[in-house]
Amino acid sequence: MPTARLSVVVTRRLPEAVETRMKELFNVQLREDDTPMTRAELVEAVSTADVLVPTLTDQIDAGLIAQAGPNMRLIANYGAGVDHIDVATARQRGILVSNTPGVLTDDTADMTMALMLAVIRRMPEGLAIMNEGRWTGWSPTALLGGRVGGRRLGILGMGRIGQAVARRASAFGMQIHYHNRRRLRPEIEDRYEATYWESLDQMVARMDVISINCPHTPSTFHLMNARRLKLMKPDAVIVNTSRGEVIDENALTRMLTAGELAGAGLDVYEHGTDVNPRLRDLPNVVLLPHMGSATREGRAEMGEKVIINIKTFADGHRPPDQVVPSML
């Protein structure tokens, strides 16, 4: 099939340079405003297009895939996470799925460290005092946070992003610990002087900071549930820049409210934009609107990956970032 004739539907506004390049290469339908497609619009897209370019705000479930037309052959996701796509059902229907791994690693790891520092050093409280004009001058005992260096960091999920967090945290003098589905090779552990914990329970109970860096899958849903959260030390901090569903948000909120945890830095939430309102009122909690990957460079590189995946598919080859169920 000639590349120029591929029908591509993009579900959200993308960086201008990405959209311009797509218009040059494909018969592309771009989104006019930056709002998620309705279910009806998604149904129309999969029933008529050759390629769908969704984002994490689109639920590409079995019901939607069942309505795919005969020409739909590729779901080229704009993003690394694919938990919003039923990859197994797509595969059964002969529809390939691709994503954009790797390009957001450093951006997300940077945000993880930013949240960690913000919580431990009480930055939001300081910002609030300044913005409200309540600062009366320096004091030896005001806004005392903690020192990051020397703390034990437990990384849950030691993939690309987890290792990038470990590299940064090591530079801050933190001690690196991790739990992963599979133990890393010795040379990688040596690189970060990282300690592997086969038991997540045992690691959680001994860490000063827990960083969530694993994807959301059926096996990681509420991996940090109420029981496991209670294993954490009262002076420990938890940071999540991965997926909100990994933490039981209600249990976390209860513990933070009760003073059973020192603080939390969250960029993602269990129920999307429906954030537990009690979290907003806690001074020891830093909330961000899913900004972990929000850099101009990262967004542009995501678009380049999407284009390469579509073009490679159009040329009759396997997309370089194809996702298969066994990977999940």
Image: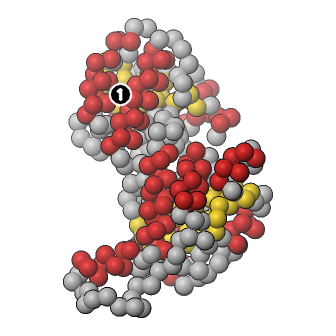
| Residue under pointer 1 | 9
Q: Nearer the viewer, residue 194 or 126?
A: 194
Q: Is residue 214 visible?
A: no
Label 1 SS: strand
Q: Position of residue 281 (x, y in %)?
A: 39, 78
Depth check, front residue: 120 or 312: 120
Quadrant location, the C terminus: top right
Indicate the quadrant containing the N terminus: top left, top right, bottom left or bottom right: top left
Q: Is residue 49 above or below residue 193?
A: above
Rendered location of residue 15, percent (x, y) = 29, 37
- Residue 69 location, x and y as percent? 45, 21
Q: Is residue 107 left or right of residue 139?
A: right
Does 317 appear above or below 42?
above
Colour setting: secondary structure
* Closest to the observer, 86 or 318: 318
Tell me the amino acid under the disc marked 1: Val
Q: Is residue 127 left or right of residue 306?
A: left
Picture residue at 43% right of the left edge, 18% below the top: 311
